Image (spheres, helix red, strand yellow):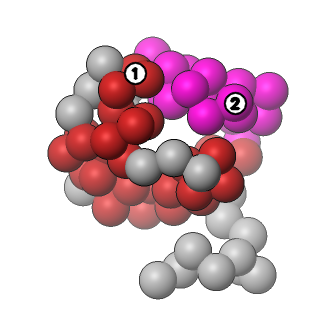
Amino acid sequence: MKQTLGKQIRRAREQAGITQAELAGRIGASQGDISSYESGRFEPLSSNLYQLARALGADHLPLSWWFSVDTDDNTNR
């Protein structure tokens, strides 16, 4: 499940057109934290996930979106 969440974080960040460093600055984290989330190495705490969603303008999305992957999506790199 970690990789699924990480892919969705990356997908939302790329759709927002911002870098990992910019996202990190918006939520008070390090670029390394964002990289670790996106790679699936670590999962954000629920409070951090909410901050990520707000910073990405995706806080309107249901929680289930963060844990689903569109198989037609090109983020499976």
Q: Position of residue 24 (x, y in %)?
A: 34, 33
6 relative to 31, above or below: below
Q: Position of residue 62 (x, y in %)?
A: 77, 34
Queried whether the magenta region covers residue 52, the answer comes back as: yes
Q: Is residue 44 left or right of residue 52?
A: left
> Amino acid under label 1?
Ile
Foreground residue, 58 or 25? 25
Foreground residue, 56 or 2? 56
Q: Position of residue 17 (x, y in %)?
A: 60, 51
- The residue positioned 53% from the left and 80% from the top of the image is 76
Q: Is residue 71 visible?
A: yes
Magenta stretch secondary structure, dominant: helix
The residue that mark 2 highlights is 57
- The residue positioned 69% from the left and 30% from the top of the image is 57
Q: Is residue 46 visible?
A: no
The residue that mark 1 highlights is 27
Q: Is residue 54 left or right of residue 36?
A: right
26 relative to 32, above or below: above
Q: Where is residue 30, by image quadrant?
A: top left
Q: Position of residue 77 (x, y in %)?
A: 47, 83
Q: Please rate how many residues cluster around mark 2, counting C-alpha atoms within 10 Å: few if below 14, some from 14 to 19, many from 20.
A: some
Label 2: element kind: loop
- The residue positioned 43% from the left and 23% from the top of the image is 26
Q: Where is residue 31, by image quadrant?
A: top left
Residue span colored magenta:
46-64
> Amino acid under label 2?
Gly
Label 1: element kind: helix
Queried whether the magenta region covers residue 6, the answer comes back as: no
